Image (spheres, rainbow, N blue to C red):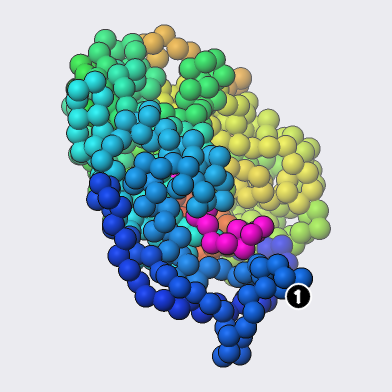
Amino acid sequence: MEPEGGHGTGAVGSRSGMRKEAKIALIGAAVVAVAAGAGFTAYALTGGGSENDGTQGSDRTAAGEPKKEQGPPSAAEVRSTGAEFLTAWAKGDAAAAAAQTDDAKAARAALASYRKDAHLTEVKLEPGKASGQKVPFSVSAVASYEGTSKPFAYESELTVVRDEKSGEPVVRWQPSVVHPDLREGDSLRADESGKPPIKAVDRDGTELTTQKYPSLGTVLDSLREKYGDKAGGEPGVELRIVRKDSEAAQKGAGTSDSDDKALPDKTLLTLSKGTPGTVETTISAKAQANAEAEVAKRQRASVVVLKPSTGEVLAAANSNTSGMNVALQGSLAPGSTFKIVSASMLLEKGLAGIDKPHPCPKYETYGGWKFQNVEKFEIKNGTFRSSFAASCNTAFISQAKKLKDNDLTKQAQEVFGLGKGDWTSGVSTFDGRVPVQSDAQMAASLIGQGGVRMNPLNVASFIATAKTGTFRQPYLVSPDVDDRTLATAPRKLDASAQAQLKELLTYTATSGSAAEAMSGLGPDIGGKTGSAEVDGQKKPNGWFTAWRGDLASAAVIQEGGRGGSSAGPLVAAVLRGGA
């Protein structure tokens, strides 16, 4: 159920199973094995046996074949398998290390490339304390290229599993074992063929660095990817992650920001500095610093600030600075914040009027699903104004039977510029998704569930469109820099509908579910709360979006609960901080 108006679909079933595990007793003593010349220390366990009701049993089947072990590896098997893999890797024996994995071909290629393409030598690997099937380990090496060398160190992790065919413990192969930032198809390289470095500056010329603005890491990487060749710099020698998707884009497989949803190439170590070129952005150092400070106070928080009058992005920040840039590239159900788009459609179609009577019952059934309001509230003899301000789900679900399956998709694309995949923001962005759906899923989409997917950039954009009546594509780099064309929407929101929608949002921010968070920010304000259920989460994702003057913001706090109390204070703080 969505606290700001989620949907109820009946009981959710769960399945559980019992797994019989063979007991394994590994008898032996831990011995220290030092790989000569590698500087690697690991712990290996020698000896072994089996246990059956306290007595030693046969380790072969009736046919004389070895028994295949079942169940997860024991702690001793995890330690010894991890140690053998790391020892072979440290020695530079890619074949032997790969033989300890469940995908020897892929592992051997990656580990051979580690030395050949990344030019990493003097590799030392130190395992940490195993936790379950996982073994953390530290890596230290020397990266060298044409006479230039530098030390390189980082932390990684491996997982030991039981091979399905042999029953032997093996390392589950995945690129992140080599380096935690590697994904399938990525590679490590050290050379001087990368993009020239850039010096990114904010709208007033202040330099933007990851040291001062940690959330901009992927943004700066993306700017370098797109503008490094155009900004007038010269490349240096770097150890970097080359993304599979970025290579495809360079060969013509993708041409727009939205086509390439992958992360940009990432520099891990600079062996010799190049000459940076300057790239101007729309970011406001003041707004970015404020956003960084606010998300740092919270967990799994992401926020965007932009100017409704122009579409310029002033700030984008995430509390998790090392993972995906959720603020710009996330793909999450936006919950009731999406009622802004749905309401605009109902207003244009005459299915709602701001002060016309509108149903808000406890329950509403459509397409076989039973939807309800948080705590099963209802509004008797209410208007669309009261339903919208209270974020009544059933007020929207009740209109589903009067809509065509593609009505919401058309509204999102034609008025709000969402879901067409044509934004050219200057960096990689996800531009929203509003698929054509039918029956219960179509109804769920009206309240921001179903197949609807957004991020804070998208949500800030559609409240900005609601305020001004005109979609202006968000961007971080002015189109004047590279003469690219910004995306447009085919039409403006109907004037009458826009006036009513703007009044609804102002009323919600002053007297409705957004009022507590927006207190003291008036008079030119508007806002909307939202929460979205996610399978497997105890608490929904909390959403909030609002404008104050010529600033619009949206935020999500994953597993934050109700949007008004979780994401609301975050949005209010960045709006109060200004630009």
For residue 265, say whether it is visible: no
**The N terminus, quarter of image:** bottom right
Query: For the residue carrying disc 1, how many other residues have a C-alpha within 10 Å: few (<14), some (14-19), or many (20+)?
Result: few
Residue 406 in percent (x, y) is at 74, 34
In the image, 567: left or right of 123? Answer: right
Give the x, y percent position of residue 466.
Answer: 51, 35
Q: Quadrant of the C terminus?
A: top left
Secondary structure under badge 1? loop
Identify which residue is drawn at 27% across, 17% down. Answer: 235
315 w.r.t. 282: above or below: below
577 or 266: which is nearer to us? 266
Q: Which residue occupies 58% across, 57% down?
A: 534
Quadrant of residue 51 within the rendered picture: bottom right
| Residue 289 showing in the rendered view | yes
Q: Which residue is mark 1?
A: 62
Q: Nearer the viewer, residue 391 or 119?
A: 119
Task: Report the magenta residues as a range.
Answer: 163-176
Residue 199 percent across, percent down from the top left: 23, 22
Q: Amino acid at mark 1?
A: Ala
| Extreme residue in the front direction | 64
Is 250 contained in the magenta span?
A: no
Q: Main secondary structure of the magenta part?
A: loop
What residue lies at 56% left-to-right and 35% top-to-bottom?
432
Extreme bottom residue here?
54
Q: Is residue 47 left or right of residue 11?
A: left
Rendering quarter of residue 489: top right
Tell whether position 173 is magenta: yes
All told, the count of numbered labels is 1
Q: Residue at coordinates 26% horizontally, 40% vertically from top-left? A: 122
Q: Position of residue 516 (x, y in %)?
A: 38, 58
Above or below: residue 438 compared with residue 75: above
10 relative to 104 in the view: left or right? right
